[in-house]
């Protein structure tokens, strides 16, 4: 009977877990709808701004645009965008893995610092030599507590100022780009310096008439566009997180359901075996009385 009790406890435990994962799936689905709407509205604007920025930078001399200056890559800042919470499958691990691959590959000979926008990345790098919060809030991942354009802009401004001061020669964003609810694509995107758009292997040749003066465009449009790019990456990551968590919780709920079904089958087999054993004992006792 002890075995039956253990199986009953397992069934109760798995049913409780299944209720939790099912609830988390529904919560993520509701949040995903809002996050998906936000990135869907933001992406066309951000991409057009990025196109204008890239075309503009191609028409500038290095002396005209501080954010377009190409330097020998000795110091790199990687902005790791993860989530503050787990239970979302490989969402966070994919970002960490991509950064690790870059450190061993493209940036092997450079000094790499990681700015963690997301507690999961913060926890990974906070005790390593790559971790940095110099000039930033001690907990930059708090940006996700209230994700707004203003909060994102403050981080973008610090990144741009450190690049302009020569502290970093290259800045890269690593994040999950939202594709659909079940699919996210890991992206490594150059943030600084700004590079010209490449079309069919050649730099685009779009001509612009500057109004007002080119210097004012440089001072206002480029920083604003960079802020938009970071905010878009954060929105992409948020939508991807909810999609990944919804998918993970859906799979967990299905697995829990299958486990409950198997446990109930085992319970019924054990119960039938116990009943059969008791019947055999009763029959054996009756036979012995006849003898």
Image (spheres, rainbow, N blue to C red):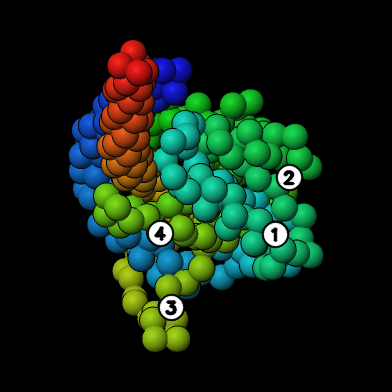
What's the mark number on residue 173? none
The residue where tag 4 is placed is: 185
Residue pictured at 64% horizontal, 62% vertical: 101
C-alpha span from label 2 to label 1: 10 Å
Can residue 69 be seen from the camera position used here?
yes
Query: Is mark 2 in CB contact (under 8 Å) with mark 1?
Result: yes
Depicted 195 relative to depicted 240: above or below: below
Which one is earlier in the sequence, the residue at label 2 or at label 3? 2
For the residues marked 2 and 4, what is the alpha-carbon distance in whole angstroms? Answer: 24 Å
Label 3 crowd bin: few (<14), some (14–19), many (20+), radius 10 Å: few
Tell me the mark number nearer the camera, choosing from 1 and 3.
1
Q: Would you identify the image quadrant in which residue 151 lies?
A: top left
Instruction: Check the image and report above or below for 3 versus 241.
Output: above
Residue 198, disc: 3
The N terminus - image quarter? top left
The first of marks 2 and 4 along the sequence is 2
Mark drawn on residue 130: 2
Distance, label 1 to label 4, CA atoms, is 20 Å
Q: Name the residue: 38% across, 81% down.
A: 199
Labels 2 and 3 touching (C-beta < 8 A): no
The foreground one among 247 and 203 is 247
User: In screen coordinates, is 134 left or right of 88?
Assistant: right
Callout 2 crowding tier (Cα within 10 Å): few <14, some 14–19, many ≥20: some
């Amino acid at each position: 009977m002890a075995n039956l009790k253990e199986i009953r406890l397992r069934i109760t435990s798995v049913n409780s877990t299944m209720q939790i994962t099912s609830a988390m799936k529904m919560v993520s689905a509701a949040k995903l709808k809002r996050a998906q709407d936000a990135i869907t509205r933001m992406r066309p604007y951000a991409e057009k701004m990025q196109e204008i920025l890239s075309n503009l930078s191609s028409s500038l001399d290095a002396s005209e645009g501080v954010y377009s200056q190409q330097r020998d890559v000795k110091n790199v800042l990687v902005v790791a965008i993860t989530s503050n919470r787990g239970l979302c499958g490989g969402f966070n691990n994919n970002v960490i893995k991509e950064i690790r691959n870059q450190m061993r590959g493209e940036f092997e000979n450079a000094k790499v610092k990681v700015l963690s926008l997301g507690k999961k990345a913060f926890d990974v790098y906070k005790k390593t030599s790559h971790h940095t919060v110099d000039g930033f809030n001690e907990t930059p991942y708090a940006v996700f507590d209230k994700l707004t354009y203003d909060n994102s802009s403050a981080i973008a401004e610090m990144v741009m100022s450190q690049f302009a001061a020569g502290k970093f020669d290259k800045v890269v964003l690593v994040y999950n780009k939202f594709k659909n609810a079940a699919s996210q694509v890991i992206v490594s995107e150059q943030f600084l310096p700004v590079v010209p758009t490449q079309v069919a292997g050649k730099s685009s040749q779009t001509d612009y008439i500057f109004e007002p003066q080119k210097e004012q465009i440089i001072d206002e449009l480029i920083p604003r566009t960079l802020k938009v790019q970071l905010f878009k990456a954060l929105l992409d990551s948020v939508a991807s997180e909810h999609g990944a968590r919804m998918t993970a919780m859906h799979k967990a709920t299905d697995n829990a359901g299958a486990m409950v079904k198997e446990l109930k089958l085992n319970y019924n087999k054990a119960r039938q075996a116990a009943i059969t054993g008791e019947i055999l004992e009763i029959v054996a006792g009756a036979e012995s009385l006849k003898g």
